[in-house]
Amino acid sequence: MIVKRLLLFIPLVLILLLLQSYFWVPTYENQAAGNPDRLVTYIEGSSGDAKILNPILNADSSSSSIVSQVFEGLLDLDENLDLRGRLATDWQISERAYLVVNPHHRFPDGAEVTGARLFQKIQEAWKTGTDEGLSKAVQSVELLSATQRQDSISLLLPNAEGRPQLKDVRVAVHVPERVAFTLSQVDQDLFDRLKPIVGEHYFEHFPYDEAIHPQEELAKETEQALRDKYQEILPVGEHNPIIVFHLRKGVKFQDGHEFDAGDVKFTYEAIMNPKNLSPRTPDFEPIKTVEIVDPHTVKIIYKRLYSPAVNAWTMGILPEHLLNDESLTRETEQRGLSAEAQKAFGMRDSQFNRQPIGSGRFQFVEWQGDEFIHLKRFDGYWEGPAQYHDFYMRIIPELFTQEVEFRTGAIDFYGAQPHQVDRYKNDPTYQWFSSLGFAYTYIGYNNRKPLFADSEIRKALGMAINVGEIIQYLMYGEGERTTGPYPKNTEWYDSTIQPLPYDPQGAKAIFQQAGWHMNAEGWLEKDGKIFEFNLITNNGNPIRKNLMTIAQNAWKKIGVKVNTQVFEWAVFLGDFVNTGDFDAVVLGWSMGIDPDLFQIWHSSQAGPQQLNFVGYKSQRADELIVRIRQEYNRDRQRQLTHELHRLIHEDQPYTFLYAPLSTRVLDKKIVLVEEGPDGKEQYKKIYPTKSGDITFYFHKWRKLEFTPDF
């Protein structure tokens, strides 16, 4: 009887406990009732922990998301993807250019070249407006005297074991007379404009042996390596773009120290210091000098044309007073390091990388490895403090766990997978944002292989694939057709270009015109060989794996025989992609905002370990790529990128498939808080910018106690 009563009584007690807990346990809807601080605390989940919280050293996305909150650059991108000033209020771009006098050359009229004659002819053309571009951009012309200088030239040479090693060679350089040009804007065609004056071949033959003299005896191999650098050591025509930044006054780092021009110069020098092994070095290598004009003015002089250099200044600026040599030495002493350890100590070893101090909206508080990183708002931020008081990045490796935590309100943000999007779109609790990022997915063909050498064949392979069905069924509609190498949401993408049609019969006709005919087994055959190749991708990406199967089946319908393989990422890259030892790959690119595509598409980048691993080669594409990276005028850049886009689309080195949509989900209680005309708070719905970014106005976000009606 007692047991029977217990069996009846215990469930009843449990039911009563659950009922009364309803009245005191906060639900998702009123979770802030017992903890009002939750409304001003933003918590984000990350699948991986950060590595290093230093803007010149970090290279992973988890670190970057924290670094972008703690540090600030001279510039950043506004809601329309245009550059705007941040630590710099404004900037001007101009140019100083130099033309060396070549006394071994003759003018087109047969007269010998001298400094005086060269200067006179150029000055006459400039003043009379013979060349409209010359008269429009050039502000002044002057003749400079000959000079002498000493240089240390770094050469990459094989050592005794055959491994590449840097060797510095001292040279004396006799710099002849030069005509100097001051331009109001960068003009990459300046020296082409001068060819009618100086002659078509003026820049091709220069007596470098008379001007450059090694200060030591050189081995034959070293001498040849030095000769290869002659045009770099003493360019006959030299472009020196100049950016002058005017810095914002009154900006402070989070320790109260005032930001100034010294911090900008220090950041550049830290990037270029080989000891720091900064991944940002290629972006800043084109700089010739960084000059401090005054505490709030910096002059950056570049040694050659390189328009992406402007975007590089969006990177966070370091505090010199915390990371200079004196500070690092003091840190080694405080940590009690040995003399040997102190000698090897550098910025990468500093505790600053785990306890950073910047000038951004949020300042560092705590980092518990593989658990969380905690930031709090910086009340001394020059533009005013953020709405959120605290920012947490929690490490949650599993996506399933991230979603559970999000749905319970433990984190505020969730990146929905394509198959989950409809669920959130139909849930009134959440606000969702599906937008394009800077990525696209493609099938890349090894253009070096005879099977893929013909662009018409590559076109036919693309026409056989129904990309619309891929987007509909594999991506659940979370993707858009793409036609070329630029992100769709940038001005560099030519939206007038139409994607390849899905046309299997048309694809068959192209193969037939190329001499391929269907054999008895249903495969395309030519000269006794079947059109057969291997399609590979990396393991761990189910969408790419499914894409392989879809492409394989589509090509089978037109008689193309394809074998598929999946490899671990390290093997996939090391044994196949980086070596160029593959037929075709399924991959994707995550692009940046800059229009420079040199590394991915220029023919010089088609070797082992380089990014043009499909081996695409086009003389016209090379010309366009170089002109784009040397063009500082945005309108002209856009015209050039559209031409490059169309050219690559016509050549079809890739079958461009789709640009994935990214769907971000937030609680509807998170809103934009702005001050109205009457000084009272106004709540507005969060919206994405042109780039698809919903966090551009993150500093205005706050969580309300109620769900607003909009």
Image (spheres, grey):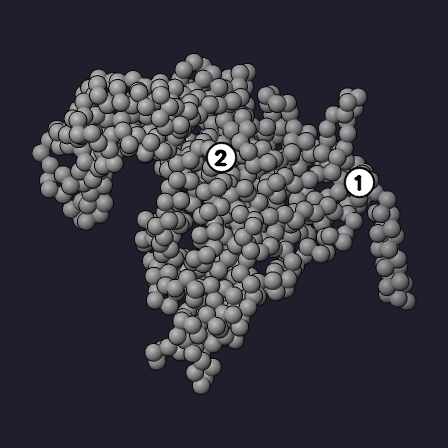
For badge 1, the amino acid type reads: Phe
Give how far apart the Cα atoms at labels 1 and 2 are: 38 Å
199 or 629: nearer the viewer = 199
User: Circle 2 is placed at which residue position?
Assistant: 634
Residue that appears at 71% across and 49% down: 407
382 or 208: nearer the viewer = 208
Element at label 1:
loop
Sequence-first disc among 1 and 2: 2
Residue that appears at 22% across and 47% down: 163
Which residue appears farthest toward the top when viewing the image?
294
Residue 229 sits in which quadrant? top left
User: Is the residue 251 above or below the residue 593 in the image?
Assistant: above
Q: Locate residue 25 relative to residue 83 in the image: left or right.
A: right
Element at label 2:
helix
Residue 660 placement (x, y as % from top left): 58, 53
The quarter of the picture where the N terminus appears is bottom right
For badge 2, the amino acid type reads: Arg
Q: Locate residue 690 relative to residue 151 in the image: left or right.
A: right
